[in-house]
Image (cartoon, helix red, strand yellow):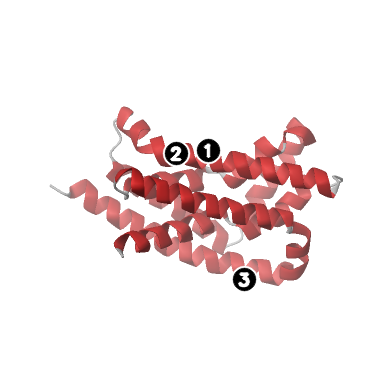
Amino acid sequence: MAMTDAMISAFTTLLVTVDPPGLAPLFLGLTQGMTAAQRRQVAIRGSVMGFAILTVFALFGATILGALGISMGAFRIAGGLMLFAIAFEMIFEKRNERKEKTTGDAITKDHIHNLAVFPLAIPLIAGPGAISATVLISGTLDGWAGKAQLIGVIAVVLALVFVSLYLAERLNKFLGVTGRALLTRLLGVLLAALSVQFVVDGVKSAFAG
């Protein structure tokens, strides 16, 4: 049961952090002028690369932290604060402004053929928040079985990202401005609560023993 709860928490955290519905309008902006087939190619490549990046951090994030001498407790506190900052931006409509600026810059510098790598895979899908969340969640799981389940959760979230990108045009029209604003705020409140839990767990871990 505890593992099931952990996986539900992992899924919720990653889903909110990656924010598939929020990526849809940005993806439309990125791929403006492309055919449906070209958009599908970008969506597939971006989703696969995002999955690969998050999987690497799920498997080796703790090892990298250990090599740098950073305790998991300290990383939980730092990661929780970072996730809280993202939640704050989501609630007060700052996150989309930042993402849209990233999107605009990337089109100027890298042109259309590199969109799947940058900015779609990094930083829009596998951004600092998603990477931090992945490492934090991975640190709470025991053994390779837990890591394998986390990778499964990442796969499900990235599959939802692909579906969201594939249906971007229809999703954008369906949600509308009000629907997107409401969804973003609800997800932001949920992420804020989860991020505070990460900080509490980090403080407990840092001062244990």
Q: Is residue 181 above or below residue 39?
A: below
Dot 1 and dot 2 residues touching (CB under 8 Å): yes
Task: Classify mark 2: helix, strand or loop.
Answer: helix
The residue pinned by badge 2 equals: 57
Residue, x 66% and y 36% (percent of image)? 118
In the rendered structure, which disc, 1 or 3, sits on the residue that comes first in sequence? Answer: 1
Q: Residues within 10 Å of mark 1 (few under 14, many from 20)?
A: some
Residue, x 16% and y 49% (percent of image)? 208
Q: CA distance from mark 2 to mark 3?
A: 31 Å
15 and 202: which one is in front? 15
Number of callouts: 3
Q: Amino acid at mark 3?
A: Leu
Residue 30: x %, y % from top left: 76, 45
Instruction: Name which quarter of the figure residue 179 lies in.
Output: bottom right
Residue 42: x %, y % from top left: 73, 42
Let me know if residue 95 appears in the view: no
Q: Is residue 3 left or right of residue 28?
A: left
Q: Is residue 35 above or below residue 192?
A: above
Let me know if residue 43 appears in the view: yes
Q: Amino acid at mark 1?
A: Ile
Task: Classify mark 3: helix, strand or loop.
Answer: helix
Q: CA distance from mark 1 to mark 2?
A: 7 Å
Residue 165: x %, y % from top left: 70, 53
The label shown at residue 182 is 3
In the rendered structure, which disc, 2 or 3, sits on the residue that comes first in sequence? Answer: 2
Residue, x 71% and y 69% (percent of image)? 175
Residue 86: x %, y % from top left: 51, 54
